[in-house]
Amino acid sequence: MQVLVIGAGVVGLAVARAAARKGHEVVVAEAASVIGTGISSRNSEVIHAGMYYPTGTLRGRHCVAGRRMLYEFCAAHRVPHRKCGKLIVATNAAELEKIHAIEVQGGINGVEGLEMVGANAARALEPELACVGALFSSETGIIDGHAYMLALRGDLEDAGGAIAFNTPVIGAARKGGQWSVRFGGGGGEFAFDAVVNCAGLGAQGVARAMEDYPAARVPRLVLGKGNYFTFAGRPAFSRLIYPTPIVGGLGVHVTLDLAGRMRFGPDVEWVEQENYAVDPGRAKLFYERIRTYWPGLPEGSLSPDYSGIRPKLTGPKEPQADFLIDTPLQHGLPGLIQLFGIESPGLTSSLSLAEHVTGHLAS
């Protein structure tokens, strides 16, 4: 089967790799000149354990399965990563109830290595921490996201797949039992047996360009911007530190990179269009939020770093939507799979999502 995957981000590369390894002829169409320039290069690079997500959701299922697969992949492909663990902290009794509920949900989701710890035990792990209790997750880690994508690309090409850069998809239609796809940038028009839309922030636009796909099935795109600030000084923590989750995200947390540098983010900023500038004025809110669990944060120690935008399907004060994977079983068009709203924990879930998606290629 000739398969076109649209988008060379982490999920698109994982899907393309899985399809090629199953014997399909795979081409990835990427609008940019290199892999992973969008969501995949603008996140926390965290390997999530999977305790947050509601029972039966695609997020819950694929985060847990994908995390296990990802650690195995990293070990086999020598992708830099570290299982550093994290603490989800409560600073009052109400938050303590919430993290107890997260522990219960984690058990339902099959997450290993979760343990409630008291304030003294949390401070024994992280002396700078202020909390009344915390949930410790031993399975949470960090990863070099770009090295991971390079490894996926290597497997894809080893299996005979290819990536066409500077090749945006501008239209598609069913013709003669195949998908006839039109490409910009002088790419012409080619036929494929199956098309998988992994275009991230561009997924809705690609879907609307498919003549036979019902417009009513294209979900709205809500841009949830997350800003990050870097810390000037020696890291105060050796593990990831997360506050109790907020509406729209997991809160301004401590994240570490593999070089040991410490940064904070993301917050949630609802925007109307893509804009990756970090407003230095948002530092005031960062100081306030961080000091709830790290009172010792020095004044003047935060500097704007980078930002990312999540392709959310729901907006402010709305319950978070699940991943949306629209297959021929739902929409009735053979050989077409659309992925919408693949935000966090998309990186962690990528290998499991790839198995799920490629399982629908014959439908």
Image (cartoon, rainbow, N blue to C red):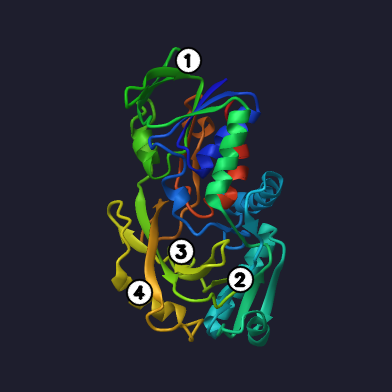
Residue position marked by numbered label 4 in the rendering: 283
Disc with the residue nearer the chain's start (3 vs 4): 3
Compared across the picture, whether 35 is left or right of 140 comes to left
Residue position marked by numbered label 3 in the rendering: 249
Horizontal and vertical percent position of residue 300: 37, 80
The Cα atoms of the two marked residues, 2 and 1, are separated by 53 Å
In the rendered structure, which amino acid carries the disc numbered 3?
Gly
Question: Quick one: quadrant of the N terminus?
Answer: top right
Asked if one can make out residue 3 in the rendered structure from this viewpoint, the answer is yes
Whether tag 1 and tag 4 are in contact, CB under 8 A, the answer is: no
Q: Nearer the viewer's eye, disc 3 or disc 4?
A: 4
Whether tag 2 and tag 4 are in contact, CB under 8 A, the answer is: no
Whether tag 2 and tag 1 are in contact, CB under 8 A, the answer is: no
Horizontal and vertical percent position of residue 139: 68, 62
Q: Nearer the viewer's eye, disc 2 or disc 1?
A: 2
Kindly identify the residue that appears in the image at 62 percent across and 62 percent down.
51
Residue 239 tag number: 2
Q: Residue furthest top?
A: 176
Residue position marked by numbered label 1 in the rendering: 177
In the rendered structure, which amino acid carries the disc numbered 4?
Ala
Disc with the residue nearer the chain's start (2 vs 1): 1
Compared across the picture, whether 275 is left or right of 154 comes to left
Observer-nearest of 275 and 314: 275
Kindly identify the residue that appears in the image at 58 percent across and 80 percent down.
96
The Cα atoms of the two marked residues, 1 and 3, are separated by 42 Å
Q: Quadrant of residue 314?
A: bottom left
The Cα atoms of the two marked residues, 2 and 4, are separated by 22 Å
Within 10 angstroms of label 1, few (less than 14), some, or many (20 or more) residues? few
In the rendered structure, which amino acid carries the disc numbered 1?
Gly
Question: Quick one: quadrant of the C terminus?
Answer: top right
Kindly identify the residue that appears in the image at 38 percent across and 45 percent down.
201
For label 3, the SS is loop
